Image (cartoon, rainbow, N blue to C red):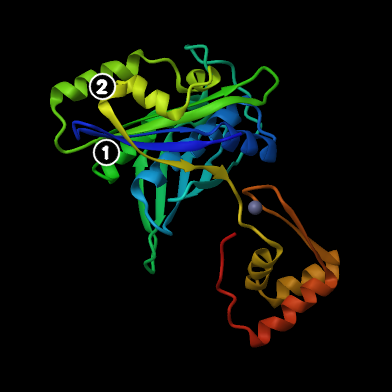
Amino acid sequence: MTDYLTKSVTKDGMFRAYAMEATGVVSEAQKDHATWPVSSAALGRSLVASLLLSSSVLKGKESMTVKVLGDGPAGGIVVDADANGHVKGYIHNPHVDLPLNSHHKLDVGGAVGKGSLEVMKNQGGDEPYVSNVQLVSGEIGDDFTYYLAQSEQIPSAVGVSVYVNEDGTIGAAGGYLIQVLPGASDDAITQLEKRLKSIPMISELFLSKQKPEDILKLIFGEENIDILQNMPVAFTCDCSKEKFADKIRGIGNKEIQAMIDEDHGAKVICNFCESEYQYSEDDLKALLSKKHNDKKDDEHDA
Ligand SMILES: [Zn+2]
């Protein structure tokens, strides 16, 4: 599986356009979290949209955490993404089961519900930069489009789609993000809007073996775009037994002693990738003794 994101700009300088295949990314998430179709689509679209967003607004070692905080049965989605094509995420309820919506599609908007989209950017400063917008529809693409316009002041169009096979595996997934640059004419924007309405679903294009470059050419015309870069994207989690040990150390001696006395060990499961880490009584005792001479217990993240 070769997932990648293609960055391009139109020759007239009016639009910056990204297209990405993420079938492997969403398949990995589906397997790790054993998601059912509606949850697969909701989490998958969030992974795709977050990768498109992080690739377009972050640089270098910056990263972001995106939270889709709706009141629907999905119960919240959390995604971490960076500027270099790495993403991981989870959905609170992996087993949402809803009938198809009125367009005969998986009801992602119904699963997500009403609420907000929160984006927390880690750009190297002391405090992350957090911004919130209301969810427009819970269908994810619209919500990210609205976020870009409101919070980043970048008029954009975000399209994301996930095709779930009959057996629950992922057939195809991907999306596009198009930013309107300052020189764009109203006429060109109207033309683009029409064009985006007329093209097939992105996941269908990937199902028929189109590549991200083909989608950009389909939208703008082959002669009108300059391809700038292809960047691999992947679902990856950087958790480890050591990182979770730091977290356990952070909860304090009393709690750790209770785990030793009552449970004779501990098990931690990573929210992002479902990896399991076992800590024996000896492992936990080592964390206890370190507490006294190691003040580095404020580290976090996994
Ligand atoms: Zn993990």
**Residue 128, percent from left and from top:** 39, 61
What residue sits right under mark 2 in the picture?
A: 192
Q: Is residue 204 above or below residue 248?
A: above
* Residue bearing mark 1: 149
Tag of residue 44: none
Determine whether 147 is above or below 129 in the image: above
Residue sitting at x 34%, y 42%: 133
Residue 199 seen in this snapshot: yes
Q: Secondary structure at mark 1?
A: helix
Q: Residue at x 31, y 40 (%)?
A: 148
- Quadrant (top left/top right/bottom left/bottom right) for the N terminus: top right
Of circles 1 and 2, the one toward us is 2
Q: Quadrant of residue 24?
A: top right
Q: Amino acid at mark 1?
A: Ala
Q: Position of residue 214 (x, y in %)?
A: 41, 24
- In the image, residue 193 sits, relative to residue 156, either above or below, namely above
- Earlier in the chain: of badge 1 and badge 2, it is 1
Residue 236 image offset from top left, x and y in percent: 59, 48
- 285 or 31: which is nearer to us? 31
* Observer-nearest of 43 and 221: 221
Name the amino acid type tagged 2. Answer: Leu
What residue is rendered at 47% in x and 45% in y? Answer: 67
Q: Quadrant of the C terminus?
A: bottom right
Total of numbered circles in the picture?
2
